Image: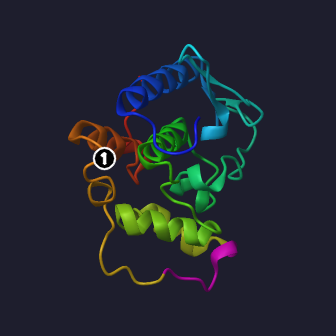
Amino acid sequence: MEEGPINAGFVKQYIYQLIRGIAYMHSINVIHRDVKPENVLISKQSTVKICDLGFARTIPNSHVMTDYVATRWYRAPELLIGRDDYDKSIDIWSVGCVMAETFDGEPLFPGENDLDQLYRIQKCLGPLIAPHQEHFLKNPKFIGMKFPEIHSLETLERRYFGKVDKHGIDLLKKMLKMDPSMRITAE
């Protein structure tokens, strides 16, 4: 995708095509696992192509799924805390992050490490859901670590005020639900 913000009409067209592509992959039980701007190609005819299927996997998968997949900035909370029992909803989270980035050209959650990434997500969307908090506390990688206190949320509405209409914010919120079972599907 281009660098910097993209015209709202093009955003709708590109994100629609991206979601349709992800919906097709999900319909044949494939998770991309690395949706990010660099893996979304746009032709001169404004056709979107999803590339780099190196992390893609079929589901259900008899092998243990690794939590180290998508580039950190586009990684769903369940991946960041180390879950390996995730599903197609991780791609939806990533599409939401890509969509947000098209609004102003800036990554939504540019964390410097997994802990910082989780903090930035919570600062925007609120606390982790209880099962994720429990998994975070049990993950040896995070033993002894805790998040800085969050005094006020930097909401999506505040960040994109005047840049995105209420329908765009609504779709973004549905893609970026903390609870993966509550995220909208690509379909």
Tell me the quadrant of the picture where the C terminus can be found: top left
Query: Taking 45 as reference, is 79 above or below it?
Result: below
Residue depicted at x 54% and y 25%: 22
Judging depth in this view, the residue of 18 and 160 nearest the camera is: 160
Q: Position of residue 84 (x, y in %)?
A: 64, 50
Q: Is residue 136 magenta?
A: no
Residue depicted at x 48% and y 62%: 132
- Note whether residue 97 is visible: yes
Instruction: Classify mark 1: residues with Cα within 10 Å, few (<14), some (14-19) or many (20+).
Output: some
* Quadrant of res 117: bottom right
Q: Which residues are magenta?
A: 140-147
Q: Position of residue 106 (x, y in %)?
A: 50, 53
Colour setting = rainbow
Q: Amino acid at mark 1?
A: Lys
Q: Position of residue 6 (x, y in %)?
A: 45, 37
Tell me the quadrant of the picture where the N terminus can be found: top right
Circle 1 is placed at which residue position? Answer: 163
**Is the stretch drawn in magenta largely helix, strand or loop?**
loop
Judging depth in this view, the residue of 1 and 169 nearest the camera is: 1
